[in-house]
Amino acid sequence: MTSTESATAAMRYQLQYLTDRAEIGDLMDRYLRSLDEGRFDEAWARAFHTEDVTAEMPIGTVHGRGALLARVRAGMALFDRTVHLGTNPVIEIDGDRATVRGAQLSTHVLADGSEEVFVSAGHTDSALVRTAAGWRIAATSLRIVWTRGTPPRVPADLDAQVPGA
């Protein structure tokens, strides 16, 4: 390989790495924004997650895109309005796989008519894979570090509302 070919290959690699970082960052930003928009349907689930996604959330762990969709619907129904902010992502890319660790601050107005505000903060750890449709979340874990305010009353039958939970 000539030095020109080597330099070209290095530039292609660097361009792919930067493109992947931008796409992954955009996916994570769009995901958090989507939680506030409240349109949770099959298209939403496919836009962000693999079919066999695993998600650990404060309201339980689920396996599979359908179960995640049902759990997010049930969980977000506890709130009238929300604002989710993600920051300080550390993105590590290894070929067609990546990990993202970031901070998350979430403000929620309870849907129980009280207008109480519940704030939570923590860290997310996500594993992503490159698919034919682009990067998707294959596994994610949200670990809450602190909260402030009145938490929502989670229905005792939440698991019954979520197939595969």
Image (cartoon, rainbow, N blue to C red):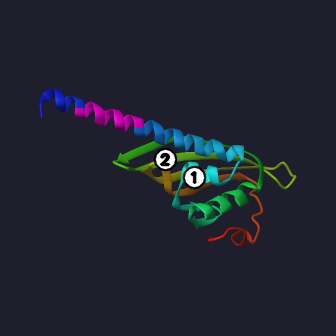
Q: Is mark 1 on a helix, strand or loop?
A: helix
Q: Which residue is drawn at 53% across and 60% down?
A: 51
Q: Which residue is drawn at 56% across and 56% down?
A: 142
Q: Please say whether residue 17 is one of the residues in the magenta stretch.
A: yes
- Asked whether residue 57 appears in the rendered view, the answer is no
| Contact (Cβ within 8 Å) of mark 1 with mark 2 | yes
The answer to which quarter of the image holds residue 152 is bottom right
Q: Residue at x 75, y 72 (%)?
A: 157
Vertical placement of residue 103 versus 75, above or below: above
Image spot of residue 37 (x, y percent): 71, 43
User: Farthest residue in the left direction?
Assistant: 2
Instruction: List the residue tagged with mark 2.
Output: 133
Between the C-alphas of marks 1 and 2, the distance is: 9 Å
User: Farthest residue in the top direction?
Assistant: 4
Q: Give the range drawn in magenta.
A: 9-19
Q: What residue type is labelled 1?
A: Arg
State the residue in front, 21 or 49: 49
Q: Residue at x 34, y 49 (%)?
A: 94
Q: Quadrant of the N terminus?
A: top left
Q: Which amino acid does label 2 sit on?
A: Ala
Image spot of residue 124 (x, y percent): 53, 52
Vertical placement of residue 136 versus 57, above or below: above
Q: Please say whether residue 21 is one of the residues in the magenta stretch.
A: no
Q: Which mark is residue 46?
A: 1
